[in-house]
Image: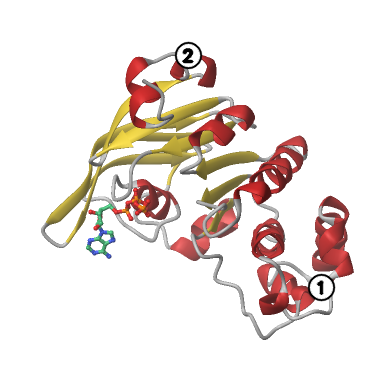
Amino acid sequence: MLEIKDVNVSYGNVQVLWNLSMHVKDREALAILGANGAGKTSLLRTISGLNVPTSGEIRFQGENIVGVEPYKITQMGIAHVPEGRSLFPNMSVGENLVLGGNLSTPQQRAQTLEWVLSLFPKLEERYKQSAGSLSGGEQQMVALGRALMLKPKLLLLDEPSTGLAPIMLPVIFNAIESIKDEGLTVVVVEQHVQEAFKHVERAYIIENGRITIEGLPKDLENNPEVRRAYLGID
Ligand code: ATP
Protein backbone atom coordinates (compact mmCIF):
# COMPACT_ATOMS: atom_id res chain seq x y z
CA MET A 1 0.00 0.00 0.00
CA LEU A 2 3.02 2.26 0.51
CA GLU A 3 6.09 2.29 -1.74
CA ILE A 4 9.10 4.46 -0.99
CA LYS A 5 11.82 4.61 -3.62
CA ASP A 6 15.25 6.23 -3.41
CA VAL A 7 14.12 8.97 -1.05
CA ASN A 8 16.61 11.61 0.09
CA VAL A 9 15.73 14.03 2.88
CA SER A 10 17.77 16.92 4.28
CA TYR A 11 17.36 19.50 7.01
CA GLY A 12 19.13 22.46 5.37
CA ASN A 13 22.58 21.19 4.47
CA VAL A 14 22.33 18.12 6.64
CA GLN A 15 21.14 15.03 4.82
CA VAL A 16 19.33 12.58 7.13
CA LEU A 17 17.80 9.97 4.78
CA TRP A 18 19.87 8.51 1.96
CA ASN A 19 18.40 6.71 -1.07
CA LEU A 20 15.92 5.06 1.24
CA SER A 21 13.60 2.47 -0.28
CA MET A 22 11.02 0.40 1.55
CA HIS A 23 7.47 -0.81 1.22
CA VAL A 24 4.52 -1.53 3.47
CA LYS A 25 2.00 -4.20 2.57
CA ASP A 26 -1.71 -3.81 3.08
CA ARG A 27 -2.77 -4.81 6.61
CA GLU A 28 0.68 -5.62 7.86
CA ALA A 29 2.30 -4.42 11.05
CA LEU A 30 5.80 -3.23 10.30
CA ALA A 31 8.49 -2.07 12.73
CA ILE A 32 11.15 0.54 12.01
CA LEU A 33 14.08 0.03 14.33
CA GLY A 34 17.34 1.85 14.83
CA ALA A 35 19.53 3.77 17.24
CA ASN A 36 18.86 7.33 18.41
CA GLY A 37 19.34 9.77 15.57
CA ALA A 38 19.22 7.06 12.87
CA GLY A 39 16.39 8.83 11.04
CA LYS A 40 13.26 6.95 12.14
CA THR A 41 11.27 10.05 13.07
CA SER A 42 12.44 11.80 9.92
CA LEU A 43 11.15 8.86 7.89
CA LEU A 44 7.68 8.95 9.48
CA ARG A 45 7.54 12.72 9.03
CA THR A 46 8.46 12.26 5.38
CA ILE A 47 5.64 9.76 4.83
CA SER A 48 3.11 12.09 6.42
CA GLY A 49 4.31 15.07 4.37
CA LEU A 50 5.94 17.06 7.17
CA ASN A 51 9.34 16.63 5.53
CA VAL A 52 9.54 16.94 1.77
CA PRO A 53 12.21 14.77 0.09
CA THR A 54 14.76 16.44 -2.15
CA SER A 55 14.39 13.46 -4.48
CA GLY A 56 12.69 10.10 -4.67
CA GLU A 57 9.18 8.74 -4.84
CA ILE A 58 6.52 7.90 -2.27
CA ARG A 59 3.34 6.21 -3.47
CA PHE A 60 0.37 5.55 -1.22
CA GLN A 61 -2.20 3.24 -2.77
CA GLY A 62 -0.66 4.01 -6.13
CA GLU A 63 -0.76 7.81 -5.78
CA ASN A 64 2.36 9.92 -5.59
CA ILE A 65 2.31 11.85 -2.29
CA VAL A 66 5.63 13.70 -2.52
CA GLY A 67 4.90 17.40 -2.11
CA VAL A 68 1.26 16.80 -1.13
CA GLU A 69 0.23 18.92 1.88
CA PRO A 70 0.23 17.00 5.18
CA TYR A 71 -3.51 17.60 5.79
CA LYS A 72 -4.29 16.14 2.37
CA ILE A 73 -2.14 13.10 3.10
CA THR A 74 -4.16 12.69 6.31
CA GLN A 75 -7.37 12.89 4.29
CA MET A 76 -6.00 10.22 1.95
CA GLY A 77 -5.80 7.87 4.93
CA ILE A 78 -2.46 8.25 6.71
CA ALA A 79 -2.57 9.18 10.41
CA HIS A 80 0.58 9.95 12.38
CA VAL A 81 0.91 9.68 16.16
CA PRO A 82 4.07 11.65 17.00
CA GLU A 83 6.48 10.79 19.76
CA GLY A 84 5.35 12.53 22.95
CA ARG A 85 1.69 12.15 21.96
CA SER A 86 0.84 15.89 21.65
CA LEU A 87 -2.38 15.67 23.68
CA PHE A 88 -4.15 18.69 25.12
CA PRO A 89 -3.61 17.88 28.81
CA ASN A 90 -6.26 20.26 30.19
CA MET A 91 -8.95 18.99 27.88
CA SER A 92 -10.92 15.86 28.63
CA VAL A 93 -10.25 12.52 27.02
CA GLY A 94 -13.46 12.92 25.04
CA GLU A 95 -12.51 16.39 23.79
CA ASN A 96 -9.08 15.13 22.70
CA LEU A 97 -10.67 12.27 20.81
CA VAL A 98 -13.31 14.39 19.10
CA LEU A 99 -10.59 16.81 17.92
CA GLY A 100 -9.12 13.93 15.93
CA GLY A 101 -12.36 13.52 14.06
CA ASN A 102 -12.73 17.07 12.86
CA LEU A 103 -12.51 16.01 9.23
CA SER A 104 -15.78 14.07 9.25
CA THR A 105 -19.45 15.02 9.64
CA PRO A 106 -20.97 15.00 13.17
CA GLN A 107 -22.78 11.75 12.42
CA GLN A 108 -19.64 10.01 11.11
CA ARG A 109 -17.73 11.39 14.07
CA ALA A 110 -20.22 9.92 16.55
CA GLN A 111 -20.04 6.52 14.85
CA THR A 112 -16.25 6.57 14.76
CA LEU A 113 -16.12 7.62 18.41
CA GLU A 114 -18.29 4.66 19.30
CA TRP A 115 -15.90 2.38 17.38
CA VAL A 116 -12.82 3.86 19.13
CA LEU A 117 -14.41 3.51 22.58
CA SER A 118 -15.37 -0.08 21.83
CA LEU A 119 -11.74 -0.80 20.86
CA PHE A 120 -10.37 0.87 23.99
CA PRO A 121 -13.03 0.59 26.74
CA LYS A 122 -10.61 2.19 29.21
CA LEU A 123 -11.12 5.48 27.35
CA GLU A 124 -14.85 5.28 27.96
CA GLU A 125 -14.19 4.98 31.70
CA ARG A 126 -11.88 7.99 31.57
CA TYR A 127 -13.95 9.93 29.05
CA LYS A 128 -14.57 13.03 31.18
CA GLN A 129 -11.21 13.11 32.94
CA SER A 130 -8.57 15.56 31.79
CA ALA A 131 -6.08 13.83 29.50
CA GLY A 132 -3.17 15.16 31.60
CA SER A 133 -4.40 13.29 34.69
CA LEU A 134 -4.16 9.88 33.01
CA SER A 135 -1.27 7.43 33.33
CA GLY A 136 1.30 7.42 30.51
CA GLY A 137 -0.16 4.24 29.05
CA GLU A 138 -3.68 5.64 29.08
CA GLN A 139 -2.46 8.86 27.47
CA GLN A 140 -0.92 6.80 24.68
CA MET A 141 -4.33 5.12 24.21
CA VAL A 142 -5.88 8.57 23.84
CA ALA A 143 -3.27 9.47 21.22
CA LEU A 144 -3.97 6.22 19.35
CA GLY A 145 -7.71 6.76 19.69
CA ARG A 146 -7.45 10.32 18.41
CA ALA A 147 -5.57 9.12 15.33
CA LEU A 148 -8.19 6.42 14.76
CA MET A 149 -10.88 9.12 14.78
CA LEU A 150 -9.54 9.99 11.32
CA LYS A 151 -10.49 6.49 10.13
CA PRO A 152 -7.06 6.01 8.59
CA LYS A 153 -5.92 3.13 6.43
CA LEU A 154 -2.31 3.48 7.56
CA LEU A 155 -1.29 4.41 11.09
CA LEU A 156 2.25 5.69 11.78
CA LEU A 157 3.29 5.37 15.42
CA ASP A 158 6.46 7.08 16.62
CA GLU A 159 7.82 5.34 19.72
CA PRO A 160 4.49 4.76 21.45
CA SER A 161 6.28 3.31 24.48
CA THR A 162 8.39 6.42 25.19
CA GLY A 163 8.33 7.32 28.86
CA LEU A 164 6.31 4.26 29.83
CA ALA A 165 7.25 1.66 32.39
CA PRO A 166 8.25 -1.63 30.70
CA ILE A 167 5.18 -3.23 32.26
CA MET A 168 3.05 -1.03 29.98
CA LEU A 169 4.65 -2.37 26.79
CA PRO A 170 2.22 -5.28 26.36
CA VAL A 171 -0.69 -2.87 26.85
CA ILE A 172 0.51 -0.70 23.98
CA PHE A 173 1.27 -3.63 21.71
CA ASN A 174 -2.06 -5.28 22.51
CA ALA A 175 -3.70 -2.03 21.44
CA ILE A 176 -1.71 -2.22 18.20
CA GLU A 177 -2.93 -5.80 17.72
CA SER A 178 -6.54 -4.63 18.16
CA ILE A 179 -5.97 -1.90 15.57
CA LYS A 180 -4.53 -4.47 13.16
CA ASP A 181 -7.55 -6.73 13.73
CA GLU A 182 -9.68 -3.83 12.49
CA GLY A 183 -7.95 -4.12 9.11
CA LEU A 184 -5.55 -1.20 9.47
CA THR A 185 -1.92 -1.18 8.39
CA VAL A 186 0.49 -0.11 11.14
CA VAL A 187 4.06 1.19 10.96
CA VAL A 188 5.64 1.49 14.39
CA VAL A 189 8.97 3.01 15.35
CA GLU A 190 10.16 1.30 18.48
CA GLN A 191 13.23 1.04 20.72
CA HIS A 192 11.97 -2.08 22.50
CA VAL A 193 13.03 -4.42 19.74
CA GLN A 194 12.24 -7.66 21.53
CA GLU A 195 8.67 -6.62 22.29
CA ALA A 196 8.18 -5.23 18.79
CA PHE A 197 9.30 -8.54 17.26
CA LYS A 198 6.46 -10.33 19.05
CA HIS A 199 3.83 -8.21 17.35
CA VAL A 200 5.00 -7.25 13.87
CA GLU A 201 5.22 -9.24 10.67
CA ARG A 202 8.33 -7.54 9.30
CA ALA A 203 10.94 -5.00 10.31
CA TYR A 204 13.45 -2.61 8.80
CA ILE A 205 16.56 -1.40 10.55
CA ILE A 206 17.83 2.09 9.80
CA GLU A 207 21.39 3.16 10.44
CA ASN A 208 22.61 6.66 9.65
CA GLY A 209 19.63 7.36 7.42
CA ARG A 210 19.94 4.16 5.38
CA ILE A 211 18.03 0.91 5.54
CA THR A 212 20.62 -1.73 6.35
CA ILE A 213 18.56 -4.80 7.25
CA GLU A 214 15.05 -5.96 6.39
CA GLY A 215 13.29 -9.15 7.31
CA LEU A 216 10.95 -11.26 9.36
CA PRO A 217 11.34 -11.06 13.14
CA LYS A 218 12.27 -14.76 13.35
CA ASP A 219 15.13 -14.20 10.90
CA LEU A 220 16.28 -10.95 12.46
CA GLU A 221 16.35 -12.56 15.90
CA ASN A 222 18.97 -14.95 14.54
CA ASN A 223 20.99 -12.30 12.72
CA PRO A 224 24.28 -11.86 14.65
CA GLU A 225 24.39 -8.12 14.05
CA VAL A 226 20.80 -7.58 15.20
CA ARG A 227 21.42 -9.76 18.23
CA ARG A 228 24.50 -7.76 19.20
CA ALA A 229 23.35 -4.24 18.40
CA TYR A 230 19.61 -4.35 19.12
CA LEU A 231 18.92 -7.32 21.37
CA GLY A 232 22.01 -7.03 23.58
CA ILE A 233 22.89 -10.71 23.07
CA ASP A 234 26.44 -11.74 22.14
P1 ATP B 1 15.37 9.28 18.04
O1 ATP B 1 15.20 7.84 18.35
O2 ATP B 1 16.42 9.94 18.89
O3 ATP B 1 14.10 10.05 17.93
P2 ATP B 1 15.48 9.07 15.15
O4 ATP B 1 16.01 7.78 14.61
O5 ATP B 1 14.02 9.24 15.16
O6 ATP B 1 16.07 9.31 16.58
P3 ATP B 1 15.60 11.57 13.75
O7 ATP B 1 14.89 12.29 14.85
O8 ATP B 1 14.89 11.33 12.50
O9 ATP B 1 16.17 10.19 14.30
O10 ATP B 1 16.94 12.35 13.45
C1 ATP B 1 17.83 12.00 12.39
C2 ATP B 1 18.93 13.03 12.33
O11 ATP B 1 18.38 14.28 11.93
C3 ATP B 1 19.64 13.28 13.65
O12 ATP B 1 20.99 13.46 13.38
C4 ATP B 1 19.01 14.55 14.16
O13 ATP B 1 19.90 15.26 14.97
C5 ATP B 1 18.70 15.29 12.87
N1 ATP B 1 17.52 16.17 12.96
C6 ATP B 1 16.28 15.80 13.35
N2 ATP B 1 15.41 16.84 13.27
C7 ATP B 1 16.14 17.88 12.80
C8 ATP B 1 15.84 19.25 12.47
N3 ATP B 1 14.61 19.73 12.61
N4 ATP B 1 16.85 20.01 12.03
C9 ATP B 1 18.10 19.52 11.85
N5 ATP B 1 18.45 18.26 12.12
C10 ATP B 1 17.49 17.45 12.60
Disc 1 designates what residue? 106
The quadrant in which residue 136 appears is bottom right
> For numbered disc 2, what is the local secondary structure?
helix
Earlier sequence position, callout 2 versus callout 1: 1
- Give coordinates of residue 74: x percent, y percent: 55, 58
Circles 2 and 1, Cβ within 8 Å, touching? The answer is: no
At label 2, which amino acid type do we have? Asp
Quadrant containing ligand 1 reads: bottom left
- Give coordinates of residue 33: x percent, y percent: 42, 37
Is residue 103 among what the camera can see?
no
Q: CA distance from mark 2 to mark 1?
A: 46 Å
The quadrant in which residue 89 appears is bottom right
Is residue 231 among what the camera can see?
yes
At label 1, which amino acid type do we have? Pro
Give the color scheme: rainbow, by chain, secondary structure or one colour. secondary structure
**Residue at image coords 45%, 62%:** 70
User: Label for residue 219?
Assistant: 2
User: Label for residue 207?
Assistant: none
**Residue at image coords 69%, 67%:** 135
> Relative to residue 44, is residue 204 depicted above or below?
above
Quarter containing the C terminus: top left
